[in-house]
Image (cartoon, helix red, strand yellow):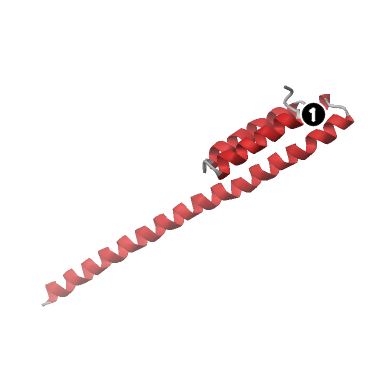
Amino acid sequence: METTNPLRLGLYLNYGVFLYEICDLIEDSRFVLKKCFDEAIKNLERLNEVELKNTLAPLQAIKDNYELWAMDVLSDKKKAEIAQLEEQARVNALKQQHLDKMGEDGQK
């Protein structure tokens, strides 16, 4: 089946959505869509006008999902960074409390 076949593109799109929505495999879903998109783009010049028209809609949907999911990857990384910073702040506060308590005990 040609890489630009609309049925093939639709199957890849659905598989990518399955990986993303059901399996929660964001990176894998993005990889699948990127590979499919790149392979199809290479062969667009071979298509006639009707084939091109039929191919562009699923290609656009693939591209849109890929870009949308990139924001999820970034937001997940940002959430992890924030959680790590919050944990570090909590640890630092506990250390400071301990040092303050030790200072108070030493002054008595």
Residue found farthest to the left:
108
Q: Position of 60 compared to 104: left or right?
A: right
Q: Position of 84 compared to 100: left or right?
A: right
State the image coordinates of residue 107 (x, y, percent, origin top left): 13, 76
Q: How many marks?
A: 1
User: What amino acid is labelled 1 in the image?
Assistant: Leu
State the image coordinates of residue 46 (x, y, percent, origin top left): 82, 24
State the image coordinates of residue 6 (x, y, percent, origin top left): 76, 32
Look at 57% across and 45% down and name the residue there: 21
Depth check: give the residue in front, 48 or 90.
48
Residue 95 quadrant: bottom left
Q: Position of 91 compared to 29: left or right?
A: left
State the image coordinates of residue 64 (x, y, percent, origin top left): 69, 45
**Residue at label 1?**
44
Q: Residues within 10 Å of mark 1 (few under 14, many from 20)?
A: some
Viewport quadrant of the N terminus: top right
Residue found farthest to the right:
49
Viewport quadrant of the C terminus: bottom left
Residue found farthest to the top:
1
Q: Position of 52 compared to 104: left or right?
A: right
